Image (cartoon, rainbow, N blue to C red):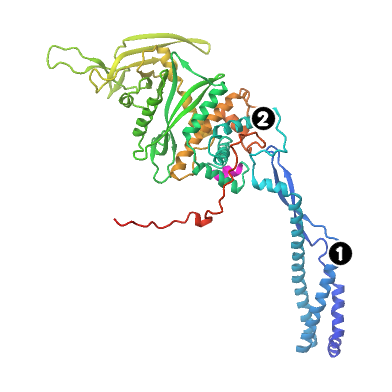
Amino acid sequence: MIPWLASVRQKSWTMMLSVVVGVNLIWPGSVGREGLRGWWVEENRQSGDGHWSYVVKKRNVTVSDDWVKMERWVRGGFWIGVSGSLVWWLGLHSGAGWAWMGLLIVSHHTRTVVTRGWAQWQTEVMWAEVTAATEQALRRELEEERAGPQLERPKEIEMKSEADLNSPAAVMGQTLAQVVKDVPVGTNQGLLLFMWMLVSGQLLASRGAIFPGLKRTGLSDAESRRVWTAFAKGRWQIEALLKVWQQQVEEEGVWQEHRLGPYRVKAVDLVGFWRPTLQNCPGQHYKAEAGRALPAIVLGVVTRVGQMGSQRVPLPCLFVRANPDDPSEKQLMLDLLQQVKATLAADELAVLDAGFKLKTILAVGLPRYVVRLADNFTARRNKAADYQGHGPRPQYGQVIRPLARSYNGRFIAATPPDREESWQQKHKDKTITITAQFWDDLVLRQEKPGAANFNVIAIHDPRYKDPLLLATSLELDGQTVRDIYQDRWPVEQLPLAAKQMLGVHRQFVHAPESCQRLPELSLLAGAILTYVAAKFPPIPTGFWDRAPKPTPGRLRRVLEGLSFPPNLPLPARIRRKASQTDHLPKGILAHRRQKRVLQPV
């Protein structure tokens, strides 16, 4: 073999080239149809959410025979040129044996690399064609998916049926639309989608993160930014939304306000949204789990109380922020009570829990109230004590202690009541007797006779270990006072629905205005969710829920994961505002900080 190869070297290079071509023909190594791979976009309709999603799956691309023949001819011609050049160069610069061995090694290696590169190039060509064909066929669906839900109903789309318009999602969408319809155009659309994100419980899945919650409703990136801007920087105030919400509820006529005796109840409370890691948090609020006050955004809340079926439903009418100059809870209570006094109608009665001090209520001059007192509360008679015949005449009244207690192992007896009342009430299968003890015409212990007076009632219920101690400025019977105070409990429903049901107990907003707006809007969203849930029959969570109730948590589970209802008839004002923004700076130029020019003193 070696002598023959040596003799071949003496012949013309054309003979050597023919041998190389023959070897290439015997050893084709073509890529063929199976070597080409591509990606194809397949559509997959997910059940339950009503929207199309597109899943990219790997699939072999079918190549025609013409492509394979063309690839073989081009590859063969390329290898003829490469092999001829190698033979010519090696034949002139090395021996015959080493020339052919090097030719085979280099040829095999080069063939492998170039073949893989050629296959990859063919795959990219096919992928470009597949992408173009896919986008052309699915252009409309892809554009709708990227643009997110459109609130404006196209004219060519028919109206939904009456059953669809009466579904929980449609009723909730229409309710939210009526609340935000008077907000400036453009902002109302963004605020509507933001409140939908709240009531549908998206913050539970995103653990309080705003943008992931907006994305879960089906919004695009641009639409999510627009909605966030409407919430954080839009021209809207919670007072206007509360006023519209009250008018809407009263016009529907389903909610009936409670009237106990001659008075309507206004429940007053403080709600804290804890922010322990927020820098420069303006306030603090007591947290029972921690046993101390933690940094929090604290709001004063005032609600009216009504009935829907067998369920009590709160109707918020006032939210009060902490004073920026003095954000303490003491000052917030003072500001809240002053606003309650200014807005309290002649037939309304303020009901407060033990967090509000009777001293502050009397200092504000709240005309009608019922407030819970501490178990160790003491007061004085509104007249001076009797003169004992020696020493100076008493200037203060007799000390009144409604409940007995022990101090340092010493028992302190309670003061006998001025009068008592008893009534019977059915509880399960038996009848219980409830007793109310009264101490009338009292003043604070540090006050002299003639100061603002009040009455104290101790209600003894055998179902509870400790009696309920209340103070009021009115002359009411014991059963009415007990019912009035129990009617304040719906105000506790608002933070429960906003925090635990909607997931706003975690918050990741840091701008001062956003830190106040998010708690306010979440409390309103919790009230709306509670109201709409009470309008529908109980919706069971599953087969295990055999005695469901119309609670906001069950309605939130129905709305969870749903986008805003498409094609829902909305007020004409709720639309995207076509503003010209070409003249405004974009990107980094829009928020670049400029150095402040100091004016000479």
Residue 413, visible in the rendered structure: no
Q: Position of residue 440 (x, y in %)?
A: 31, 13
Disc 1 vs disc 2: Cβ atoms closer than 8 Å? no
Q: Which residues are magenta?
A: 209-216
Residue 31, visible in the rendered structure: yes
> Above or below — where is 338 with respect to 236?
above
Residue 517 is covered by the magenta coloring? no
Report helix, strand or loop for mark 1.
Answer: helix
Report helix, strand or loop for mark 2.
Answer: helix
Residue at the extreme bottom: 10
> Above or below — where is 79 with respect to 91?
above
Picture residue at 70% right of the left edge, 32% below the top? 160
Q: Which residue is mark 1?
A: 66
Q: Position of residue 309 (x, y in %)?
A: 57, 19
Q: CA distance from mark 1 to mark 2?
A: 57 Å
In this orientation, which residue lies closer to the viewer: 218 or 469?
218
161 to the left or right of 449: right
Picture residue at 54% right of the left edge, 30% below the top? 528
155 to the left or right of 356: right
Q: Which residue is mark 2?
A: 165
Q: Position of residue 539 (x, y in %)?
A: 63, 26
Picture residue at 48% right of the left edge, 35% below the top? 238
Specify which label sits upstream in the sequence, 1 or 2: 1
In this orientation, which residue lies closer to the viewer: 438 or 128?
128
